[in-house]
Amino acid sequence: MELILLLFTFVLAAFLGFELISKVPSQLHTPLMSGSNAISGITIVGALIASGQQDYAISKWLGLAALVLATINVVGGYYVTDRMLSMFKSKKDQ
Amino acid sequence: MPESIINVSYIVAAILFILGIKMLGSASTAVKGNRISSLGMLLAVIVTLSKSGLDYTWIVAGLVLGGMIGLVAAKRVQMTGMPELVALFNGFGGLASLLVGWSEYEKVRTEGWGVYMEKVGDAMPGQWFLALVIVLAVIIGGITFTGSIVAYLKLSGKIGGTATIFPLQKLINLLVMLGAVVAGCYFITIVDNQTAQFWLWCVIFLSLLIGVLGVIPIGGGDMPVVIALLNSFSGLGAAAAGFVITNTVLVVAGCLVGASGLILSMIMCKAMNRSLGNVLFGGFGALTSSGGKQVEGEMKALSVKDAYYVLEAAQSVVFVPGYGMAVAQAQHVVKELSEILERNGAEVRHAVHPVAGRMPGHMNVLLAEADVPYEQLCEMEEVNAIIPTVDVAIVIGANDVVNPAAIEDEESPIYGMPIINVHQARSVFVLKRGQGAGYSGIINTLFFRENCRMIYGDAKATVGSMVAQFEE
């Protein structure tokens, strides 16, 4: 049952994604991409669960590697997007 | 923290992501949007950490290490290095999804299927489904990882940026893909058998191979499409990992990114008037015989001094930047020159083609870094409407996006691609390093036009000496 709900969520999210992005000015393409790239680092949640296990050594180490990579993706992604956008912004204030 | 609160927090995080993406789509709210979406991420991480039974020793180490690397890399990067950094981050996200899928399999293997299935209960319709989503997470994550790494290497110039084509390429790629599917099917059908591990390794290896083989034949100018598509993949990989651990927030966030990345790649394709399939499998950049008509006339060079005289008298000037501007890091001198021209009484615009550069919106980022005023940035349609009244169009390191063959020569490989019609301007200056063709190997008929003059040399040096001429 839970699976059906999950699939349902997936389909709705796909439509939502298409609706949200379809009209974006081209100067925002790069920040949009790097910002959504940071969101795709959400896999960090899975990595946290996997790396926090008490037993299952192999599984834990794989999770830990995933955690480091996903954290780089998340932290770096958000920070670099913010840097980029602040350049756009400072210019508009002038 | 009880499971129900965790789940509600995940919903809140998902809402923050949705709001964040929506606000990223408009200039006035973009900064806030990015921060809202990062809040969502923080919330998701914090509530996950509060799950009972987690061992924190290594988690903290992992978070600190990853956070530091990400922060330093993002802080240090020059704006010109942005495309490759985004590609690299994207690859890491993909690999993380692969590892999450693999890790779950190892857990099941050590724990035994009986115990595992009992624990998840209703959430999984059967072993086959878990095996299927693990395969999906691994394949998508693996392709994203190596594909992004190859893109990173190409963008940063560590390997050649042009398309690499070898004999039987399409057949080999097809066989490798087929191999991955077959190995995946084996894994799914015999997943509770000890040999299943071997098949998973095959899937991992083959998916990594697909990423490399898939991006190698794609040439430099098609990079914006590939980067956007890989971005989409990293989202789908995360969504697949979400199915593996039956976690809604992964599914929602991953799918949002998947959809937005796909749309972005479609926009890029449309801007080149090509289909996604053609970009991915066309091996476009490797065309050696360019097709199209022979060009008559010759390329006429111009000295910086003569260019100065023309610019001095110009009433309206349009800059058309391309990847060459990024390579030469010329954005700051370009801004300087445009300021001087304005003070001299000319109307200055910067015309940005949607696929100029190596990632979507690449030129906009560079011009923003150099503080070029927002009002001076024009999109292709705007500038094409006024181009006949423009005195001088200065093309800086752009090539195919200003090639009139795209509208005039039906045999040209790029026929039908929308271009910036600089050839309609009164005069055109093309700043270029040498006489060679662009990445696509297509001869640019613009260079042979009556109203076109070539100014050879490094773009930064050339624009710099124009500035110097004005200051004298």
Image (cartoon, coloured by chain):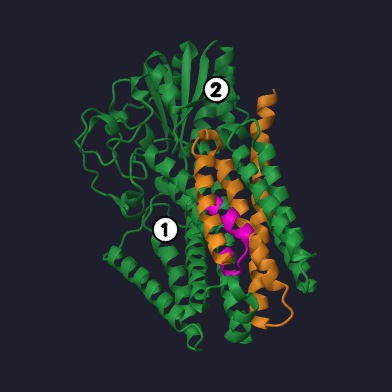
Residue under numbered circle 2? B376
Give residue B43's position: percent from left, percent from top.
74, 54
Q: Chain of mark 1?
A: B
Q: Magenta includes B395?
A: no
Q: Considering depth in this image, is B224 or B318 the residue closer to the camera? A: B224
Q: Considering depth in this image, is B435 or A85 the residue closer to the camera? A: A85
Residue at image location 76% in from the left, 67% down from the top: B51
Q: Quote the CA–CA distance across marks 1 and 2.
A: 35 Å
Q: Considering depth in this image, is A42 or B307 the residue closer to the camera? A: A42
Give residue B93's position: percent from left, percent from top.
59, 60
User: Which quadrant is home to the C terminus of chain B?
Assistant: top right
First to last magenta residue range = B241-258
Q: Main secondary structure of the magenta part?
A: helix
- Label 1 sits on what residue type? Val
Residue at image location 58% in from the left, 51% down from the top: A37
Label for residue B51? none
Considering the numbered disc 2 on the image, is that residue within a helix, a strand or a loop?
Answer: helix
The chain letter corresponding to orange is A
Is the residue B124 above or below the residue B270 in the image? below
Give residue B241's position: percent from left, percent from top.
57, 65
Label for residue B215? 1
The chain letter corresponding to green is B
Q: Considering depth in this image, is B468 or B223 the residue closer to the camera? A: B223
Q: Are marks 1 and 2 on the same chain?
A: yes
